[in-house]
């Protein structure tokens, strides 16, 4: 199957999205999800089905569909200057005098009603045209939408007023009326209802469109940060070309202040790179030859020459954008229930409005009063807010997450975070950096620390072993290394060579083969007890000292473990290392439950064992050996510094290599889910509470229209609060 994304036009409410989704899903083998907030449809097409067929189905349903415009989202028209804004402005200018004339008897001059009729007619015909058109298209396809309710309500109020003006006594000079906000006043003209309902609904749609655009601002900003052109080194000279022309393997230049054009590896130069756009980190990171850089980040220091390793859709920034968009197109379980409810809600409301009209007529109410109450029922019932509850919260939450270096794959991941009570932490590369480092230096009596580092660093500088590289790097940062010759390595034992014409050996004490003084023996024991790798160094047959190397714990890991506990999660350290090393790391970060010496294939079994005990398990990992456990867990959190396999298996991805980001991810996910649930509650509560009030004749259609518009704006505004998440 192939997945395509379609831009949908003409949707005015969640019912429209539901109808399109149903039509697409009726195609053989097609799976579709339509998002009203993003105005996009994600469609899975089976082999042999062309995208043109899906577009044709959408168009037959009464809407437009097309492949997304390649123009970046930031270039799209702003709703402030759109046709909707102009339609609202004109309707408001015409509708306000109608409301004032109808409400204030002192303003009602002779034949004022005819001026009100003249001002209302363009509002009802032109201003409300989007509602009438959508209602007509729905009726033509045998469906009723929220626009059907609005169109019928406005048309009924206007038609009743026209009948009273032309065929009743309302057109007579000297006619006066007053507006009652608590139900119908029993007056014969309802022009203010037709005009003001239209204005309020247009205002709600306009504010909703602006808010929806703001809710997607984080993703648009993320996708717009890429460089537009780049200086490529070709045939010995620098050539400025569009980024689209850059190819994998080519060398390009990044000057101070420029944006890194694409993912690559630094070949020349050293600089500080601002990663905030990708990871959310505010502190620039130092890079040099051999280090990787990410496209979209900013060079804050010196000139760099970089070899492109990924371009176009394969870059990390592009993958982040895709993951965020995919998450925003999903639906939480609560929203799927709301969609089913809203799908049958409109026909039920139409029947309810008709029953209300008949009921009031049978009770002896005048036709005009009964009709006004029915109109209030039609207007107040529009469940627009239901359709916005999940999409807007997802738009804002996932967009904010992307800014902070947290990628959420979809609503299912959000729902999982609410239930998780146990978090399993992989040690290497997750709690620790995954890189060996020199952590302790113990020279023998009469030997300076500098001399020990000079000799050991020079010898290990020729080693390819991770322990040797760690010693060499630690020594090089503090002393100047002399030359070495005659290097010979013994696998699993140590390395020997000649430094400044003196034979030197470094490795396991038994292999080094010299007498070990008591102080160095104690240092060896202490290092091994702490789970570190201890290296004995000897020169000329005499012990010079002990060096301890370890996979260093991330600075943030202890705070992260405390953060997990604060969220009600029980941390478990899971590692293939020996018990002593694992316990040392666990004690450092504050984890009590340790499972050591676990083979990669056993990690899944341990996760399942926890699940069988009734625990809801999250796994945080970064390597290929963590992928199966990430996929098995109720919630998989992949460190973005890890392998692509681990990232694909995770539900949440942390772009920055910082375990506190996992705490932030859980917090953000829970906050987003809470916002979705809050939105749905208030949307449902609004309809449930308002309908009986309107049916009882206690709500004027004007007030109903204002309340309906406010409910949608409230839901979107509530979602926008997620932008302030820290």
Image (tube, rainbow, N blue to C red):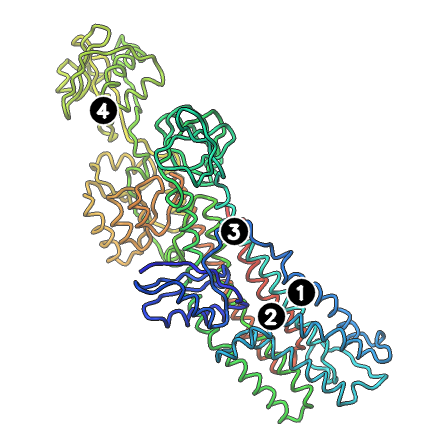
**Counting other residues with Cα less than 10 Å from the Cα at mark 3, is it few (<14), some (14-19), or many (20 or more)?**
some
Q: Earlier in the sequence, mark 2 or mark 1?
A: 1
Task: Identify the secondary structure beneath mark 1.
Answer: helix
Determine crowd level at label 1: few under 14, some 14-19, many 20+ residues with C-alpha closer than 10 A.
many
Q: Is label 2 in a helix, a strand or a loop?
A: helix
Query: Which of the two discs, 4 and 2, sits closer to the camera?
Result: 2
- Mark 4 vs mark 3: in front: 3
Residues at circles 2 and 1 in contact by the CB criterion of under 8 Å = yes
Q: Of marks 3 and 1, which one's residue comes earlier in the chain?
A: 3
Measure how far apart labels 1 and 4 are at the Cα level.
71 Å
Question: Does residue 412 appear to the left or right of 255 in the view shown?
Answer: left
Question: Distance from label 3 to label 1 (Cα)?
Answer: 24 Å
Q: Can you say whether 583 is above or below 438 in the image?
A: below
Question: As displayed, is residue 487 above or below residue 676?
Answer: above
> Alpha carbon of mark 4 to alpha carbon of mark 2: how far?
71 Å
The residue pinned by badge 2 equals 130
Rendered view: 43 above or below 721 = below
Coordinates of residue 232 in the picture (x, y in percent): 43, 31
Residue at left offset 32%, top offset 35%:
432
* Residue matched to label 1: 87
* Marked residue nearer the N-terminal end (1 or 4): 1
Q: For the residues marked 2 and 1, what is the alpha-carbon distance in whole angstroms?
A: 10 Å
Q: Which mark is residue 73?
A: 3
Numbered mark located on residue 464 in the image = 4
Vertically, is 47 above or below 699? above
């Amino acid at each position: 199957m192939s997945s395509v994304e379609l831009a949908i036009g003409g949707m005015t409410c969640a019912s429209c999205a539901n109808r399109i989704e149903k039509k697409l899903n009726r195609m053989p083998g097609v799976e579709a999800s339509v998002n009203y907030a993003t105005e996009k449809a994600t469609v899975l097409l089976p082999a042999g089905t062309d995208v043109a067929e899906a577009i044709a189905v959408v168009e037959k349903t009464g809407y437009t569909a097309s492949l997304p415009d390649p123009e970046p989202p930031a270039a799209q028209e702003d709703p402030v200057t759109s046709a909707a804004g102009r339609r609202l402005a004109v309707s408001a200018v015409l509708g306000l005098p109608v409301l004032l004339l109808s409400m204030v008897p002192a303003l009602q001059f002779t034949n004022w009603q005819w001026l009100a009729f003249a001002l209302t007619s363009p509002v009802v015909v032109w201003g409300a045209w989007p509602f009438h058109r959508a209602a007509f298209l729905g009726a033509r396809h045998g469906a009723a939408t929220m626009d059907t309710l609005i169109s019928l309500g406005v048309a009924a109020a206007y038609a009743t007023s026209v009948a009273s003006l032309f065929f009743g006594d309302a057109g007579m000079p000297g006619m006066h009326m007053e507006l009652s906000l608590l139900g119908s006043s029993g007056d014969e003209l309802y022009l203010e209802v037709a005009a003001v309902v239209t204005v309020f609904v247009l205002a709600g749609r306009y504010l909703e469109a602006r808010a929806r655009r703001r809710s997607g601002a984080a993703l648009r900003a993320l996708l717009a940060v890429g460089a537009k052109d780049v200086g490529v080194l070709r045939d010995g000279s620098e050539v400025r070309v569009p980024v689209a022309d850059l190819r994998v393997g080519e060398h390009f230049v990044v000057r101070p202040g420029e944006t890194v054009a694409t993912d690559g590896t630094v070949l020349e130069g050293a600089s500080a790179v601002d990663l905030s756009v990708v990871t959310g980190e505010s502190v620039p990171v130092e890079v040099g030859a051999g280090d990787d850089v990410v496209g979209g980040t900013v060079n804050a220091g010196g000139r760099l020459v970089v070899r492109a390793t990924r371009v176009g859709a394969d870059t990390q920034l592009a993958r982040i954008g895709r993951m965020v968009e995919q998450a925003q197109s999903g639906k939480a379980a609560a929203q799927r229930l709301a969609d089913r409810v809203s799908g049958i809600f409109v026909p039920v409301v139409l029947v309810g409005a008709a029953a209300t009209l008949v009921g009031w007529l049978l009770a002896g109410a005048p036709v005009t009063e009964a009709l006004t109450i029915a109109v209030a029922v039609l207007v107040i019932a529009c469940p627009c807010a239901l359709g916005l509850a999940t999409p807007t919260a997802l738009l804002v939450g996932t967009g904010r997450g992307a800014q902070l270096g947290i990628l959420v794959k979809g609503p299912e991941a959000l729902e999982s975070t609410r239930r998780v009570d146990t978090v399993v932490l992989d040690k290497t590369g997750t709690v620790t950096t995954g890189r060996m480092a020199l952590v302790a230096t113990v020279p023998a009596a009469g030997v300076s620390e500098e001399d020990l580092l000079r000799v050991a660093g020079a010898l290990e500088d020729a080693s390819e072993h991770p322990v040797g590289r760690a010693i060499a790097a630690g020594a090089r940062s503090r002393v100047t290394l002399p030359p070495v010759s005659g290097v010979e390595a013994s696998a699993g034992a140590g390395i020997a060579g000649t430094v400044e014409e003196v034979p030197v050996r470094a490795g396991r004490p038994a292999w080094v083969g010299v007498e070990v003084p008591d102080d160095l023996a104690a240092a060896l024991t202490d290092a091994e007890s702490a789970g570190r790798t201890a290296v004995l160094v000897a020169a000329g047959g005499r012990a010079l000292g002990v060096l301890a190397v370890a996979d260093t714990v991330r600075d943030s890991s202890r705070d992260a473990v405390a953060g997990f506990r604060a969220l009600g999660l029980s941390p478990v350290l899971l590692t293939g290392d020996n018990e002593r090393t694992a316990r040392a790391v666990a004690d450092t970060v504050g984890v009590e439950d340790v499972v050591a010496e676990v083979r990669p294939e056993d990690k899944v079994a341990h996760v399942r064992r926890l699940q069988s005990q009734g625990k809801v398990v999250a796994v945080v990992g970064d390597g290929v050996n963590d992928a199966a456990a990430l996929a098995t867990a109720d919630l998989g959190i992949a460190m973005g510094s890890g392998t692509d396999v681990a990232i694909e298996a995770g539900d949440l991805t942390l772009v920055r290599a910082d375990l506190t980001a996992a705490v932030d991810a859980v917090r953000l996910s829970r906050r987003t889910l809470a916002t979705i649930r809050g939105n749905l509650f208030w949307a449902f509560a609004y309809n449930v509470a308002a309908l009986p009030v309107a049916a009882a004749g206690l709500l004027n259609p004007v007030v109903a229209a204002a309340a309906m518009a406010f409910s949608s704006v409230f839901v979107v505004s509530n979602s926008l609060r997620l932008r302030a998440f820290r």
